[in-house]
Image (cartoon, rainbow, N blue to C red):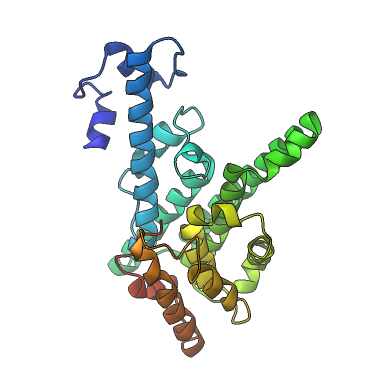
Amino acid sequence: MYQEAHLQSFTNLRLAEESRRILRTETPLPQDESVVGNEVMTLRFFRGTIIWLDITASITAGTSPSLFPSHISIIGPQSQTRLETIMGCKNWVMVRIGRIAALHEQKCQAVQQGIFSATEFGQTAKDIGKDLQRDDAQAAMESLNICETHDTAGLDAKSDPPTLVTRLFAMMAPIYLHLITHGYQNLELAQTHLSETMEMLQSQSLQQVLPALVCPLFVIGSAASQSEEQVFRDIFSSPPLLDPWPQHRGRILPILEDIWRTRRLKTTFTWEDSLDLAQNILLI
């Protein structure tokens, strides 16, 4: 429904003409028009939430996000929809994660059809990896510029919730890419990101944002070494992640335990194998 409305420039929705124009052209929100402002904010929140849930669901479903063809127009560089105000992570990371999910589906379909090209797949994965490195470096430079410009305020900005959440999702992305490419073999290739994640998880800075990190914690946790598993046991078995309201979170640790146990028994364990153990779980 949303994709159809987006592609038709919101003409099927009962919005003011100015609201449709702002949404269609990604114009910044006006400050002096309450009706238009409310409509635009509501639609941007709605589409951001749909994109977030769509990408997150695609990870454990092993499929491309349903709205993947519209990602650049909805959460691309020119978009006024800010996912960090909805789920904590900045747009650029979620765009890359959606692209990895789409690549995973393409790989699975090609294997099933007997037309898989390891060379072509490897090149695409390499290109995504380069994009991740470039975007990560650019984000780090922007953070450094903030620190140099604002001193103490910049230091605070490095530990604000969107920055922390974005950092964990950004570290998850290359690990996720590794898993769809190599499975759980050759994890030393992703060791830099795994080690940095473990350092952050053992600091106090992430405690305030743990509920926003269910997705990266699951993906990264699935690749944890045996000596690191206890960190994820502690996180998923205590507040704030172990909360009576989102009851599905109580299923995540048993799934991770199954993944860890099977990894030790099966040296050729793949990401697809882990998804067989993680069916019908939403990582939020």
Quadrant that contains the N terminus = top left
Image quarter of residue 231: bottom right
Number of numbered discs visible in the structure rendering: 0
**Percent x, y for residue 9?**
28, 23
Quadrant that contains the C terminus = bottom left
Image quarter of residue 258: bottom left
- In depth, the one of 194 and 86 nearer the eye is 86
**Percent x, y for residue 281?**
34, 64
Image quarter of residue 277: bottom left
Q: Residue furthest top?
A: 32
**Percent x, y for residue 248?**
34, 64
The residue shown at (33%, 62%) is: 61
Q: Does 224 appear above or below 264?
A: above
Is residue 223 visible to the viewer in this orientation of the structure? Answer: no
| Apparent side of residue 14 relative to residue 22 in the rendered image (left or right) | left
Q: Does 9 appear above or below 141?
A: above
**Percent x, y for residue 92?**
53, 41
Q: Does 227 appear above or below 183?
A: below
Is residue 146 visible to the viewer in this orientation of the structure? Answer: yes
The residue shown at (34%, 36%) is: 47
| Apparent side of residue 256 relative to residue 188 in the rendered image (left or right) | left
Q: Residue furthest bottom?
A: 265
| Apparent side of residue 150 relative to residue 274 in the rendered image (left or right) | right
